[in-house]
Amino acid sequence: MYQTVWNNCLKVIRDNVPSVSFRTWFEPIVPIKLEKNILTIQVPSPFFYEYLEEQYIDILRKTLRKELGQEAKLEYSVVMESNSVTNAKPYTVKLPGKSNADLKNRPVQMPLGDGEHSIKNPFIIPGIKKLNIDPQLNPDNSFSNFIEGECNRLARSAGFAVGNNPGGTAFNPLFLYGDSGLGKTHLAQAIGIRVKEKLPDKVVLYVNANKFGTQFTDAIRNNNKNDFLHFYQMIDLLIIDDVHEFAGKEKTQEIFFHIFNHLHQSGKQLVLTSDKPPVELQGLEQRLLSRFKWGLSADLQPPDYETRVAILKHKAYLDGINMQDDVIEYVATHITNNIRELEGAMISLLAQATLNRREINLDLAKEMIDKLIKNTKREISIDYIQKVVCSYFNVPIEMLLSSTRKREIVQARQIAMFFSKNLTKSSLATIGSQIGDKDHATVLHACKTVNNLLETDKRFKFQIDEIEKRLKI
């Protein structure tokens, strides 16, 4: 009887809530019993029942009244962390005559067992209260320390708007992309810092995509998937850095898809960063990529000369360094790739002056910058490796990325995977997704094949050595 009543309720609820919300908040519910007009349902956690009351009490009230009459009542049995259902008396919700406000303000009578229970925070173990979440932000990465220029004006303006009104602009999600060292992380964290300054009660969290994936794997291993999901669904501003690292990780993409949908539908803000725009990302599901395009995609370009000068002057001011204009101009002229290299040059210049007790002047700057440029190796990327390998074997890059099984193409593809694993910091899944849309197992097999040929085939070893020389020129 109770199963029939609950199934009838679900039919109505399914037609009145988004499908993702239905799967997340109603499918896990298990009806337990029906006595008189009291229906008891089992829910996975205290947070789960609190969320149901806050968001869905109206539809629960209406559907139960329809099935059981005006005196219908609802009780929750909560599964505790030990995975056993509490034996204490379930918490009763009296549905008739109560508004949402009444339900939220009454005392909570739910027994929590021994000690206080709270949803696990992946960053602060064993437990947290909602307002005590560490946002994981570096206070130095503020808007006041982010120098605006033509290279980043759109991204900064959009970020500032989001920081002043999270979830209330058309920039949701805000997708920031550009090469390494151009300030994506700084800008993303500046948004979080701005939100915490203006709206301190907002829950803000910055997390790298790799760390998110590791937390999810740990949650699966420890049977805490629901806690993981509920934790991320209560964030007001979620910042995911290097979202391209989700490539090839199907389960991680799936859980993030549900988190993204919930936050977006709830009017919460998402800020994402990547090394490429959504249209160029590989190894990610189309349903995720389409959502990345819902808001605004803004790129950060290498800083122009005027911006580089402004960055160096600001850095010198913050560090208390008296640096002449000719020194700043020399550094800005010769270090052009990204902001991280500019800051590294400043640190090296200061270290040289301090350790050798020399004045920071143009002669010292020339000496230090010349050494720095001479010793700076080309940053090797997967794209660059593919171009070099294809050039060496005279193979079109389109063939390398295709699904063809021609022997010469397969070998070139395997060599590109081998060098990508050894010369970049990319994950196997990322390498596979960018070289022919393969999985991590294919990359492992390719590396093993190349290593075996290196030991047995002198001609092959010569080819590998020649390609490596070209890569490191």
Image (cartoon, rainbow, N blue to C red):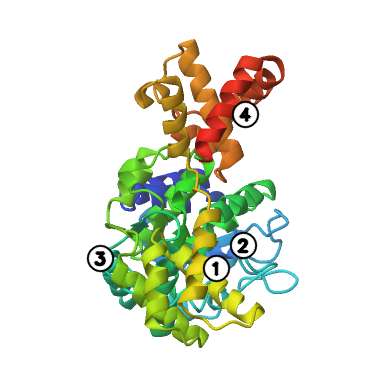
Q: Could you give the CA–CA distance between mark 3 and mark 4, rounded to whole angstroms?
A: 41 Å
Q: Residues at badges 3 and 4 in contact (C-beta under 8 Å)? A: no
Q: Of the numbered discs in the image, which one, if any, rests on residue 122?
A: 2
The residue that disc 4 covers is: 444
Q: Earlier in the sequence, mark 1 or mark 3?
A: 1
Give the label, 2 or 3, closer to the camera. Answer: 3
Asked which secondary structure carries label 2, the reply is loop
Asked which secondary structure carries label 3, the reply is helix
Q: Could you give the CA–CA distance between mark 1 and mark 2, rounded to whole angstroms?
A: 31 Å
Q: Position of residue 275 (x, y in %)?
A: 41, 51
Residue at image position (41%, 81%) is: 314
Q: Is residue 328 above or below residue 264?
A: below
Q: Earlier in the sequence, mark 4 or mark 2?
A: 2
Q: Could you give the CA–CA distance between mark 4 and mark 2, rounded to whole angstroms?
A: 30 Å
The residue that disc 3 covers is: 154
Q: Earlier in the sequence, mark 3 or mark 4?
A: 3
Q: Earlier in the sequence, mark 2 or mark 3?
A: 2
Q: Position of residue 122 (x, y in %)?
A: 62, 62
Q: Residues at badges 4 and 2 in contact (C-beta under 8 Å)? A: no
Give the label, 1 or 2, closer to the camera. Answer: 2
Residue at image position (44%, 38%) is: 384
Q: Earlier in the sequence, mark 1 or mark 4?
A: 1
Q: Position of residue 386 (x, y in %)?
A: 45, 32
Does residue 95 appear in the picture of this structure?
Answer: no
